[in-house]
Image (cartoon, grey):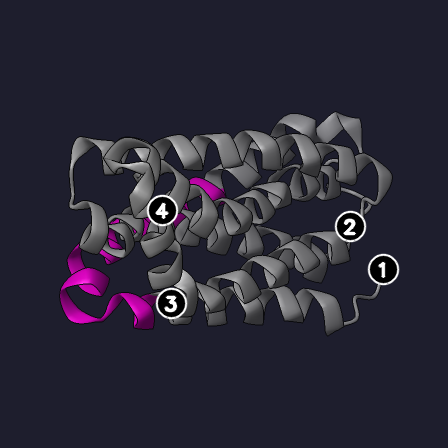
């Protein structure tokens, strides 16, 4: 796909893979974050899935708007860094958020806590999708190929994230450690996109 340096193409694809993986990690791990106060009922799962889908919708819309105005790798990278910084705060603020929402009851409280803890990073991460597609499709001749690559890498990341979370992360590590590790990976990739120069 013309118009983008090879190094930058690699960054965009790696970023899409990482975002896809961590998005699913959060969706699955969210039950462990909320369960101490709300259990693992269908309301908790429905709340997490609903918050994830709503966040994706908002992030895609905002990301599409941003991609048309600032089609730049740094926008994608900044969204990743912002979501990483929020994730680093989740282990520290989760008990306060969960305690504050218990008065709302099981249904509303589980949804409100899921939204407060996970909507901001999920919105920021989903913004990267339209930006990544915009970066890989500057030539309209290659739109299908660009979209396919982004979806492919993101979905492959989601698959890996789902398997690792269920079979490795949750059985072997604490919730806080997994969240912090996810934030570090997200931050490292985003920071690389902000600071590494790319020759065109």
Question: If you read the primary sequence from the N terminus, does the residue marked by circle 1 or circle 2 appear first?
Answer: 2
- Give the labeled residue for mark 1: 200
Residue placed under numbered mark 2 in the picture: 4
Which quarter of the figure has residue 45? top left
Residues at marks 1 and 4, CA–CA distance in whole angstroms: 50 Å
Q: CA distance from mark 2 to mark 4?
A: 47 Å
Mark 1 or 4, closer to the camera = 4
Q: Which residues are magenta?
A: 153-178
Please provide percent x and percent y for residue 132. Answer: 66, 44
Q: Is residue 155 left or right of residue 187?
A: left
Could you tell me which secondary element the residue under label 2 belongs to? loop
Tell me residue 121's x, y (percent): 52, 51
Q: Are marks 1 and 2 in contact (CB under 8 Å)?
A: yes
Mark 3 secondary-structure assignment: helix
Residue at the spot 76% in from the left edge and 33% down from the top edge: 65
* Mark 2 vs 3: CB contact within 8 A: no
Quick one: 155 or 5, which is closer to the camera?
155
Residue under circle 3?
91
């Amino acid at each position: 796909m013309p118009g983008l340096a090879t190094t930058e193409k690699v960054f965009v694809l790696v970023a899409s893979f990482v975002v896809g993986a961590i998005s699913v990690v959060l969706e699955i791990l969210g039950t462990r974050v909320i369960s101490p106060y709300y259990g693992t009922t269908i309301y908790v799962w429905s709340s997490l899935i609903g918050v994830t889908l709503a966040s994706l919708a908002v992030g895609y819309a905002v990301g599409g708007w941003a991609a048309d105005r600032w089609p730049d790798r740094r926008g994608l990278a900044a969204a990743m860094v912002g979501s990483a910084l929020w994730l680093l705060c989740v282990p520290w603020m989760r008990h306060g958020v969960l305690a504050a929402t218990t008065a709302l009851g099981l249904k509303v409280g589980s949804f409100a806590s899921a939204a407060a803890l996970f909507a901001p990073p999920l919105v920021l991460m989903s913004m990267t999708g339209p930006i990544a597609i915009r970066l890989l499709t500057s030539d309209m001749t290659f739109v299908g190929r660009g979209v396919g690559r982004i979806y492919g890498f993101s979905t492959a990341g989601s698959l890996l994230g789902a398997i690792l979370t269920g079979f490795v992360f949750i059985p072997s590590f604490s919730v806080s450690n997994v969240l912090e590790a996810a934030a570090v990976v997200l931050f490292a990739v985003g920071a690389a996109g902000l600071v590494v120069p790319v020759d065109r």
